[in-house]
Image (cartoon, rainbow, N blue to C red):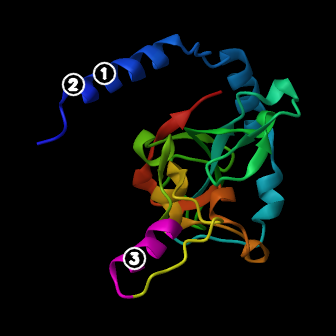
């Protein structure tokens, strides 16, 4: 049975009091849709994936919302990877994506390149265990004790963890860090529907 003693209850009360006293700012909806429209209009993916093709999957790019983009601050914060970054570069993953590549025979799909689509929330929003970290951690139970490099953080964005086996990058981008990936080749069933802007 878990610890339910007096100290645990007091700890919980303190945690609730702290979380209730922290003022949380909601998402600036106007800024969200402004960034979403910019993402929708950006056609850079056409040049980037011009020489790539897919056989039976759909290429998508996850929309990453920057809640502090308008701040243009020099304040630094730590991201999921433990790296320092300026506050205005922090982003949150969303469950909206853009179709960036369709299979050659795309007559069976209801999507066109450039369409915004809705992805599974549980595959895209939030954070999860970093697959690279989990791979290294499996050796800790064996007689090989790995040195966990600081460059491999324990957590990453959920879309990286859930869609990692489906990363879709042009060949010259082979050296991209897993936390910087936002383009994937997914099975059509992973797309829930379209989003009209």
Q: Where is residue 68 drawn, in percent x and y? A: 75, 28
**Residue at the disc numbered 3:** 140
Quarter location, residue 114? top right
Which residue is under mark 1?
10
How far separated are the C-alphas under marks 3 and 1? 34 Å
- The relative height of residue 185 versus residue 74 in the rendered view (above or below) is below
User: Could you tell me if residue 101 is visible in this image?
Assistant: no
Q: Which residues are magenta?
A: 132-143
Q: Nearer the viewer, residue 83 or 126?
A: 83
Q: Secondary structure at mark 1?
A: helix
* Quadrant placement of the N terminus: top left
Q: Residue at x 44, y 67 (%)?
A: 134
Q: Residue at x 45, y 55 (%)?
A: 188
* Residue 59, quarter of picture: bottom right
- Mark 2 vs mark 3: which is more N-terminal? 2
Total labels drawn:
3
Looking at the figure, which quarter contains the C terminus? top right
Cα separation, mark 2 vs mark 1, equals: 6 Å
Residue at image coords 52%, 64%: 164
SS of the residue under disc 2: helix
Q: Position of residue 160 (x, y in %)?
A: 55, 57
Residue of label 2? 6
Q: Is residue 16 left or right of residue 152?
A: left
Residue 139: say if magenta: yes
């Amino acid at each position: 049975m878990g610890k339910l003693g007096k100290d645990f209850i007091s700890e919980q009360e303190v945690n609730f009091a702290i979380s209730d006293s922290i003022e949380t700012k909601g998402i600036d909806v106007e800024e969200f849709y402004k960034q979403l429209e910019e993402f929708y209009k950006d056609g850079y993916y056409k040049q980037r994936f011009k020489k790539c093709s897919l056989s039976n999957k759909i290429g998508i790019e996850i929309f990453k919302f920057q809640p502090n983009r308008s701040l243009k601050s020099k304040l630094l914060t730590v991201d999921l990877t433990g790296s320092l970054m300026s506050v205005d570069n922090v982003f949150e993953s969303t469950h909206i994506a853009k179709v960036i590549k369709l299979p050659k025979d795309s007559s069976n799909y209801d999507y066109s390149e450039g369409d915004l689509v809705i992805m599974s929330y549980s595959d895209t929003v939030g954070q999860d265990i970093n697959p690279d970290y989990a791979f290294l951690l499996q050796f800790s139970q064996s007689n090989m004790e790995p040195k966990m490099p600081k460059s491999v953080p324990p957590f990453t964005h959920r879309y990286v963890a859930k869609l990692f086996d489906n990363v879709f990058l042009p060949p010259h981008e082979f050296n991209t860090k897993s936390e910087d990936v936002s383009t994937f080749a997914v099975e059509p069933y992973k797309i829930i529907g379209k989003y009209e802007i």
